[in-house]
Image (tube, grey):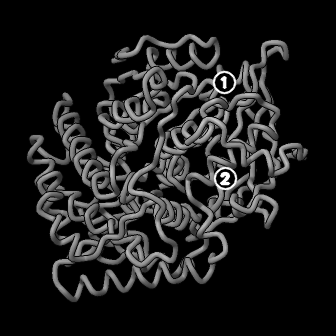
Amino acid sequence: MPMLPPRVKALSATAVLLTAALTACGDSGSDSSDEASPDQKLSWKDCPAPSAAEGGGQAPSPLPGGAEWQCATMKAPLDWDEPKGDTVDIALIRAKASGAENKRIGSLVFNFGGPGGSGITTLPAFGSDYAKLRTRYDLVSFDPRGVGRSAGVTCEDAEQLDAYFQQDATPDDAAERTKLIDNVTAFNGECEKNSKKVLPHVRTTDAARDMDLMRQVLGDDKLHYFGISYGTELGGVYAHLFPKNVGRAVFDAVVDPTQTPEQGSLGQAEGFQLALDNFAKDCTSQVDDCPVGSSEQDVKDRVAKLLKDLDSKPLPALPPRELTQTAATNGIAQALYSKDFWPYLTQGLEDAYGGDGKILMVLSDSMNGRNEDGEYSNIQAANVAINCADDKPRYTPDDVESKLPEFRAASPLFGDYLAWGMVNCTDWAVEGAADHPDVSAPGAAPVLVIGNTGDPATPYEGARKMVDALGEGVGVELTYKGQGHGAYDSKNKCVRSAVDGYLLEGTVPKAGTICA
């Protein structure tokens, strides 16, 4: 079953796994967090190797110059309505500021998206990209509750997940539809069986309260924050709950906070279709012939034919697994997250047309959090758990059937895939909180909100919706005319100058700034 979100699943953290694998192949006074031991002392130590739930691998390497990563554990209430009750461990990581102590601003807390991405593994992977920010901040990230080492949600095991991600996620008849729903029901049942205690407490509001406790434990008067993708939703919810505690904040690859899950899925269908169109245009505009099509339309027609053929005849890929229609669609979507991945998509499609599905399968595995050893992180289990706890609507198969024409109009290639993804929460054990998050934050400090015109996973229009929802005088919009998911990691000089200028010097860019 595809785990691209009913709202938005922007799994930026999977870029780390992908690169390695391909190389080888509110209110203004909410203070509930003050009741949860803000005076606890963190014991910072050398970081261990990431856990299996975080994706496995080696302990993080030192930063250029030799700075070591340090890890610690914070205690937070399992249930924020009972702050003196049971606790949950929140895993943290940091690299201390490199500049002079008298120039240090505080901690800069990152959330890289998902929901479900491990900050413990992602921040070190991209740490060198934030070297300039580290001159005045300790760089800090964390595994949000339900993720990785922070009471990570557990659902199916690796063997079950292999089968789950191979299934036909776009049913063509009643029998296939029944099988899909049965598989979703079984997956959700395993989540409840294995993680019943934590499932009611992994909402974004819970994570936002954890961040305010984190702010206090780190010794900061304000939360300085860099949120990417779903991290912008988390940041918006934090600003709503604690507007007076917002410091310098940047939202990049912005979630539209006004959308229902259905609207988010439909917008994402349009976004991935746009990204595929841009990929086709880029490939066919090269001086050399594009190896996957003679024209933009030919590229898209050949992709459509490949997916149709795979529905009945999967390709050899990574034995014993084959490249199914679902895996190929998932892999293509993963490659559209970044223009840097387009060469892999070109090679993957070219190989698939020749009968070899390995590269598209590796791309799909990256999206799903599967490593080369066949083990899965808990990114998708956490992704489903957090979204289903957040999202109030529950969509039935009949709801999906009625919406298919609209989704297919938005994207002939991704429409069915994303429409059927809406059934992920149909029989979830925990009631969803709301139709969409409340991010209104009157009185908060300025939040720099960056929209990318070519973003497939969080379409550009979401940035304006976030600015409007934050409220007058809070959101400051900046537009990046580029490709891929997010803007700062594109290394565009204009974007970097604006972000660095705000976070380091407090200089707020002019609203409506455009970077190309």
Could you say which is closer to the camera, residue 424 or residue 443?
Answer: 443
- What residue lies at 31% left-to-right and 64% top-to-bottom? 356
Give above or below for 10 relative to 295.
below
The quarter holding residue 506 reads top right
Q: Residues within 10 Å of mark 2 (few under 14, many from 20)?
A: many
One can see residue 371 in this view: no
- What residue lies at 11% left-to-right and 62% top-to-bottom? 405
Is label 2 in a helix, a strand or a loop?
Answer: loop
- What residue lies at 64% left-to-right and 53% top-to-bottom? 144
Residue 143 image label: 2
The quarter holding residue 291 reads top left
Could you say which is closer to the camera, residue 391 or residue 147?
Answer: 391
Mark 2 is on which residue type?
Asp
Residue 131 image label: 1
Q: CA distance from mark 2 to mark 1?
A: 21 Å
Left or right? Give the position of 20 relative to 421. right
Where does the image place residue 373, in percent across and percent down from the top left?
Answer: 59, 68
Mark 1 is on which residue type?
Ala
Where does the image place residue 132, in percent across and percent down from the top left?
Answer: 65, 19
One can see residue 257 in this view: yes
Is label 1 in a helix, a strand or a loop?
Answer: loop
